[in-house]
Structures are given as structure tokens and as C-alpha cells.
Image (cartoon, rainbow, N blue to C red):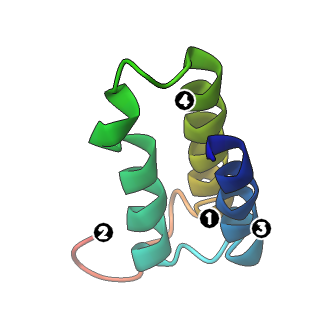
């Protein structure tokens, strides 16, 4: 279920907090904009909880790393 999936999204952010790990940041961003979350059969609360957990995870991964770049692509 969606509620059971929100916990792992948050733990992803906690595990990589402040690391600016590019791959994990891309995973979190992909989870925020998953196309299957737009299906009308899912309740709004589930979608919002899942998306919010993914957004918080992305924020925790990038925490305090706004001015630092790790590669020319960044």
C-alpha cells in the first residue's frame, strides 16, 4: 500500500542525509513525479503522503549542499 511505502522513502533521506548522492537524489525526484500516482483510483491522501515523503527525502539528501558541486554536471 501507499502508506507502507512512505516509511522507506523517509528512511532513504535519513540514510543519505547531507551526502548529495546524485543517484539517490534522482530516485527521490522520480518518486515525487511518478506517473502512476495520477491514477484516479488512488485517494488524494495516499498520493500526498507518498509525494511528501519523497520530497522530504530529497531535501534531506541535498541538505546543506546547495553551494557545493561534486562534478561539472552539477
Any mark on residue 74, and which? 2
Q: CA distance from mark 1 to mark 4?
A: 21 Å
Q: CA distance from mark 3 to mark 4?
A: 21 Å
* Image location (x, y in percent) of residue 48: 59, 26
Q: Which residue is mark 4?
A: 47
- Residue 1 seen in the figure: yes
Q: Of the two numbered discs 3 and 4 on the same chain, state the one appearing first in sequence.
A: 3
Q: Can you tell which quarter of the image residue 58 is in?
A: bottom right
Q: Nearer the viewer, mark 1 or mark 2?
A: 1
Q: CA distance from mark 1 to mark 3?
A: 8 Å
Q: Which residue is mark 1?
A: 61
Q: Nearer the viewer, residue 9 or 39?
A: 39
In the rendered image, the residue lying farthest to the front is 41
Q: Residue at x 50, y 60 (%)?
A: 67
Q: Residue at x 48, y 58 (%)?
A: 28
Q: CA distance from mark 4 to mark 2?
A: 30 Å
Tally of marks: 4
Q: Residue at x 30, y 69 (%)?
A: 74
* Image location (x, y in percent) of residue 68: 50, 70
Q: Residue at x 71, y 43 (%)?
A: 3
Q: Of the two numbered discs 4 and 2 on the same chain, state the one appearing first in sequence.
A: 4
Q: CA distance from mark 1 to mark 2?
A: 15 Å
- Residue 64 seen in the figure: no
Q: Nearer the viewer, residue 27 or 59?
A: 27
Q: Nearer the viewer, mark 1 or mark 3?
A: 3
With 49 as the anchor, is 54 left or right in this view? left
Q: Which residue is mark 3?
A: 14
Q: Of the two numbered discs 3 and 2 on the same chain, state the one appearing first in sequence.
A: 3
Amino acid at each position: 500500500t501507499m502508506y507502507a511505502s512512505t516509511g522507506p522513502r523517509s528512511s532513504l533521506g535519513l540514510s543519505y542525509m547531507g551526502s548529495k548522492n546524485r543517484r539517490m537524489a534522482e530516485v527521490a525526484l522520480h518518486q515525487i513525479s511518478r506517473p502512476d500516482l495520477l491514477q484516479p483510483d488512488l485517494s488524494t491522501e495516499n498520493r500526498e503522503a507518498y509525494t511528501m515523503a519523497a520530497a522530504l527525502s530529497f531535501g534531506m539528501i541535498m541538505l546543506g549542499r546547495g553551494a557545493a558541486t561534486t562534478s561539472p554536471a552539477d
